[in-house]
Image: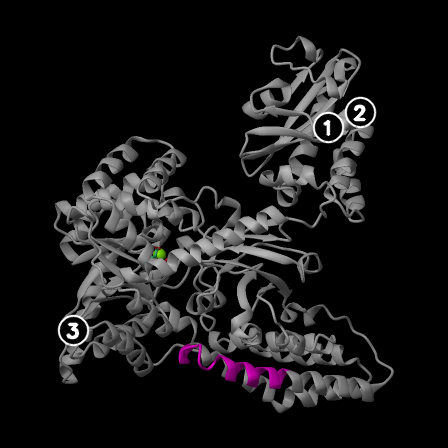
């Protein structure tokens, strides 16, 4: 009986000892051929550039033919399987109309042929084929065996042998197995970087330390004290180092860590455990666990969150005990990519900013603290790449493509070269765009767009202004809340909001009310839900927490005194009543302003269009809102039912999807009909191809991250609105997102803006 899972287990076990990719492929063909008692097993990999399949390993065919046999997709039996992406089982291959003979393989002896496509996440990677002399079909069981093997190997194969590198692989068959480990994550911060990976010490898990006794308590005590002192020093240094580059709101996070480290109980209790005979690591774990447990049990969500901070600090001290005392990081002299499971702010701060090239996190999402920080510092970051073995990637070279949320560890030379070229091209492009700052965002045929910045950090103010933003189209007010240790007081909020309003006055600032829930959690008010994206999110949350909401509205109003450039934007509106209820609260807040003698104009109120129900109800929304803004990030997510943060479905998440663009077109058209100003404020407005469509629809306001403003402006200043409208009409008729993108990218090429796409602006 064939045992596919056992064969796979054996393959994976033996693969651990192998060094070269070639050996791994040979191991696979060897095991499959043996298990099936077939005469031949071969693997062909696809090179998408040339649409050719190359024979990369075989057991049974002539070894000389490896690398020599190449078939176009559609040609020969293997090409036929690739084209149709389905299995082929024939008893006499040479009689099949698609059969093509390759003399170098000497395969004329083999009659029966079974081939199965290797597909990972809908992408064809290659084909695995078995052959035998006997002219009889392979059995159902044998079919099932090869299907299982192909399905299970598709993921690992796609990770280390990149289709685009099959050529390189064939030219250098000894390329190490760890080469080209490619991971798809979710966007943290845009940009491209190449650097050496440093796996973060803080990912040492104190919780996994076993109960271990020690023979020399004095030595253990010394070890603990040294590690603790080092952690304190690191924190002091990092705070100092980051002072110039981080805003106060972000820096405040350091003080929490400092307080925990200075806590006398942390050291005295650990020391007691060590004196009782436990090792330093065990003693520390017992102390940290005890304190974390106490906090975790508390009702107050703010205090609950302290449990995580304590664990974080524990990991840090433990990492220092491991001999990795953190000081080597200060000796970094080359561009470095920080990688880790749960990177904290102190981790980032350890590194000299000029060498911090990029950030890779195995967990987290685009709204994690670390992603927010990376954006503020302008460092490319990819989040949520999933589990990875640190020893496999530590100290390797890696490239980060923050636009596509892809990381490749240990890239083969040609890929590295290509990314270097892209990074240079990107830098050149960005430099070249500086001159656009003071030019209007207007098409050559006179269609004027208002170009606003998306922001949330005080640190973002100047990048937006520097790049010529004409206001803030989306101020994500949850960001200061996320960076705080507890709900910021009303006065604190006033100060933060005032800075933004003042910086942009008299231009408008669209302040969005607190949008938490889904992937945006407040550390001090965490709650868990089965389905958070459909749960207590955005305005649903704030309407249920009236005092928090009223205090935020009051803070916004107070901050706008004398400036009157405030507009309020409501997130995740899915019911009309939500907008009505907000007006009630705004009335109340205005009344309180009057009573307090604060003179402010009643701000305009807008609704985010992020969910299908808001799109459908636009006519009614138009009666009670002053404007709307399409949040294309969530809108795409909810129209397509595709999680915007899940790398497994990231291929399906596409704002050029026909359903998405037609829906956006519908919103824009209806808004125009009801005289309702409409803007687009999600990432879509930073995608040059999508910008053409938005122009074509007649959208007059776009809001995007400061970093991408010049690129979008360049598109606007290059294409006429008339041409954009033609392309929009064509795009509307297409039913395939890839065709839509191809058409738009061709246009960008014709406009001489192809570099914008290749610099990764999508
Ligand atoms: C959006 O959903 O497009 C949006 C702008 O809001 P956020 O990304 O903050 O959810
Ligand atoms: Mg949103």
The magenta stretch spans which residues?
Answer: 231-249
Label 3, on which residue?
A: 564
Instruction: Tell me if mark 1 has few (under 14), some (14-19) or many (20+) residues whose alpha carbon lies within 10 angstroms of its own.
Output: many
**Residue 153 numbered tag:** none
Lateral position of residue 123 relative to residue 324, left or right: left
Q: Position of residue 439 (x, y in %)?
A: 22, 60
- Numbered circle sitting on residue 42: 1
Q: Quadrant of residue 426?
A: bottom left
Residue name at image x 56 percent, y 86 percent: 236
Q: Is residue 754 magenta?
A: no
Residue at the (83%, 78%) spot, across then down:
213
Point out residue 674 in the picture as x, y percentages from the top left corner: 13, 48
Q: In this orientation, does residue 457 appear?
A: yes
- Label 2 sits on residue: 60
- Asked if residue 305 is positioned above or below residue 133 in the image, the reply reads below
Quadrant where the N terminus is found in the figure: top right
Tell me, yes or no, whether the two marked residues, 1 and 3, touch with CB atoms within 8 Å: no
């Amino acid at each position: 009986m064939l045992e596919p899972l056992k064969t796979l287990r054996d393959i994976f076990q033996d693969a651990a000892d192998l060094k070269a990719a070639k050996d791994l492929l040979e191991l696979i063909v060897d095991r499959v051929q043996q298990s099936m008692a077939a005469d031949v097993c071969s693997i062909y990999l696809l090179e998408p550039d040339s649409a050719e399949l190359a024979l990369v390993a075989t057991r049974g065919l002539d070894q000389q033919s490896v690398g020599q046999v190449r078939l176009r997709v559609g040609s020969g039996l293997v090409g036929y399987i690739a084209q149709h992406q389905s299995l082929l089982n024939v008893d006499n291959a040479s009689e099949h109309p698609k059969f093509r003979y390759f003399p170098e393989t000497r395969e004329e002896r083999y009659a029966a042929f079974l081939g199965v496509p290797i597909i990972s996440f809908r992408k064809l990677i290659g084909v695995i084929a078995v052959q035998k002399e006997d002219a009889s079909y392979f059995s159902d069981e044998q079919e099932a065996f090869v299907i299982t093997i192909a399905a299970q190997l598709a993921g690992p194969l796609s990770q280390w042998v990149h289709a685009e590198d099959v050529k390189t692989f064939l030219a250098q068959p000894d390329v190490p197995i760890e080469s080209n480990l490619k991971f798809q994550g979710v966007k943290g911060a845009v940009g491209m970087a190449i650097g050496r990976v440093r796996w973060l010490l803080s990912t040492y898990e104190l919780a996994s330390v076993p109960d271990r006794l020690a023979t020399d308590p004095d030595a253990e005590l010394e070890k603990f004290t040294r590690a603790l002192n080092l952690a304190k020093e690191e924190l002091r240094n990092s705070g100092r180092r980051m002072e110039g580059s981080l805003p106060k709101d972000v820096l405040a996070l350091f003080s929490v860590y400092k307080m925990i480290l200075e806590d006398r109980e942390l050291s005295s209790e650990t020391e007691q455990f060590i004196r009782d005979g436990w090792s330093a690591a065990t003693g520390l774990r017992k102390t940290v666990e005890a304190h974390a447990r106490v906090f975790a049990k508390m009702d107050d969500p703010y205090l609950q969150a302290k449990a995580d901070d304590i664990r974080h600090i524990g990991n840090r001290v433990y990492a220092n005990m491991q001999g990795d005392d953190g000081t080597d990081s200060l000796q970094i002299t080359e561009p470095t990519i920080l990688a880790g499971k749960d990177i904290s702010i102190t981790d980032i701060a350890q590194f000299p900013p000029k060498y911090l090239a990029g950030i890779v996190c195995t967990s987290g999402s685009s709204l994690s603290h670390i992603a927010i920080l990376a954006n503020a510092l302008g460092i490319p970051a990819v989040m949520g790449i999933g589990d990875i073995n640190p020893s496999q990637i530590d100290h390797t070279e890696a490239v980060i493509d923050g636009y596509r949320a892809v990381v490749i560890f240990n890239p083969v030379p040609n890929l590295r070269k290509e990314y270097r070229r892209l990074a240079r091209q990107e830098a050149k492009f960005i430099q070249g765009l500086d001159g656009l700052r003071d030019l209007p965002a207007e098409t050559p045929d006179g269609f004027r767009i208002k170009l606003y910045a998306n922001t949330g950090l005080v640190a973002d103010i100047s990048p937006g202004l520097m790049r010529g933003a004409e206001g803030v189209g989306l101020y994500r007010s949850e960001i200061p809340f996320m960076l705080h240790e507890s709900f910021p007081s009303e006065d604190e909020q006033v100060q933060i909001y005032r800075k933004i309003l003042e910086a942009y006055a008299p231009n408008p600032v669209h302040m969005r009310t607190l949008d938490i829930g889904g992937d945006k959690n407040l550390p001090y008010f965490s709650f868990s839900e089965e389905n958070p994206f459909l749960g207590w999110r955005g305005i649903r949350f704030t309407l249920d927490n009236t005092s928090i909401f009223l205090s935020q509205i009051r803070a916004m109003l107070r901050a706008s005194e004398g400036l009157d450039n405030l507009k309020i934007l409501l997130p995740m509106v899915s019911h009309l009543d939500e907008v009505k209820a907000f007006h009630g609260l705004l009335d109340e807040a205005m009344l309180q302003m009057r009573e307090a003698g604060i003179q402010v104009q009643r701000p305009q109120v807008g609704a985010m269009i992020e969910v299908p129900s808001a799109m459908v109800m636009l006519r009614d929304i138009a009666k009670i809102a002053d404007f709307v803004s399409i949040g294309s990030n969530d809108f795409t997510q909810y129209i397509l039912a595709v999680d915007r943060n899940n790398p497994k479905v990231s291929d399906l998440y596409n704002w050029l999807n026909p359903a998405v663009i037609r829906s956006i077109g519908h919103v824009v058209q209806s808004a125009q009909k009801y005289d309702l100003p409409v803007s687009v404020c999600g990432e879509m407005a930073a995608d040059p191809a999508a910008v053409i469509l938005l122009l074509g629809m007649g959208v007059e306001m776009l809001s995007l991250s400061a970093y991408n403003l010049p690129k979008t402006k360049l598109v606007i200043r290059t294409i006429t609105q008339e041409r954009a409208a033609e392309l929009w009409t064509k795009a509307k008729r297409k039913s395939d997102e890839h065709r839509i993108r191809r058409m738009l990218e061709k246009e960008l090429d014709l406009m001489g803006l192809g570099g914008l796409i290749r610099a990764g602006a999508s």
